[in-house]
Image: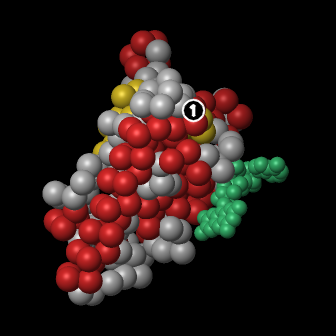
Amino acid sequence: MKYFVHEYNHIEKWKHLRQDLFRNEEPNLRLVGLTVPTKDLVDQGVTTETLPAYTARQSHESEGTHEDDLRLNRKLVSWGHHTCLEAVQFVYLVTGVSKSLAGQWTRHRIGIGWTFRSTRYVKANKNTFVYPALEYLDSEDQVMGIYRAYEREHRRAIEVYEEIRAMGVRNQELRRLMPVGWATAAYVYVNARALRHFFELRLDTSAEWEIRRLAYLMFNDAMTHAPSLFEDMLERAGASPGGHAS
Ligand SMILES: Cc1cc2nc3c(=O)[nH]c(=O)nc-3n(C[C@H](O)[C@H](O)[C@H](O)COP(=O)(O)OP(=O)(O)OC[C@H]3O[C@@H](n4cnc5c(N)ncnc54)[C@H](O)[C@@H]3O)c2cc1C
């Protein structure tokens, strides 16, 4: 975690209290796929990151070095010439996010898609839960008391689940017992243009904490692979590596 560190740490300020909570699961992000140019382009020095600029050169039949292409990437971003950013596709495995988050995330319709763990085919009785961050509270005792209340509800959901499962109820009806804080997992397929749009909306401090936390994780990963496509967002937020947004 290199960018938006202050905001991320603020959201995670009670993480240590959650460690031993009943079936707690924290979010995790793993890149499992990323567009790679074909061998003939790689031989010309084109990389994942410079594929947008390389393909954009079609419009003027121009040529440039790797450095020129990085500069052109930044210009494309600033001009709003964003179609070329669709050249780069990311595939992530995301775990430890809630059904509540999934409801918000899947409102993004363009250039993004998911395969979620099915709640019809997979039983939920082994499921974990995503506890809220409660970063706006200052008292550790108060936060722990609230976490205990969530724990009670989560335990109860599992108990009732088991009770009526024994009566023959199927997964697709059993899942209705689960609070929206239960954890799910998904592969997400998203291109760099759609990722920027997601960051625009969800890195903002007006976004809800859980989806913002995920946006921080994704932004940090995306910046390690193609900084020229995303770094302007950092500058606009007034943030710097290791720093924080204003
Ligand atoms: C802080 C915050 C609060 C929110 N609160 C609520 C809420 O209270 N209730 C609620 O229901 N939702 C809420 N949302 C969700 C929000 O309304 C959007 O559905 C969500 O952010 C996805 O954004 P999008 O439509 O721009 O993304 P995408 O669906 O990925 O679309 C990307 C872009 O493509 C264009 N586009 C997509 N579809 C169309 C179309 N049909 N016609 C024309 N242009 C299109 C638009 O330019 C759009 O911005 C909230 C979002 C945020 C960030």
Mark 1 sits on what residue? 172
Ligand 1 position by quadrant: bottom right
Local crowd size for mark 1, using a 10 Å CA cut-off: few (<14), some (14–19), many (≥20): some
Label 1 secondary element: helix
Residue at horizontal 41%, vertical 51%?
Answer: 157
Q: Which residue extends farthest front?
A: 167
Residue 165: % across, % down: 45, 33
Q: Nearer the viewer, residue 93 or 190?
A: 93
Residue 19: % across, % down: 17, 58
Q: Amino acid at mark 1?
A: Gln
Asked if residue 173 lies left or right of residue 148, the reply is right
Q: Quadrant of the N terminus?
A: bottom left
Q: Quadrant of the C terminus?
A: bottom left
Residue at horizontal 43%, vertical 23%?
Answer: 36
The answer, for residue 231, to whether it is visible in the render is no
Residue 95: % across, % down: 36, 41
Asked if residue 157 lies left or right of residue 204, the reply is left
Q: Which residue extends farthest bottom?
A: 138
Q: Nearer the viewer, residue 57 or 172?
A: 172
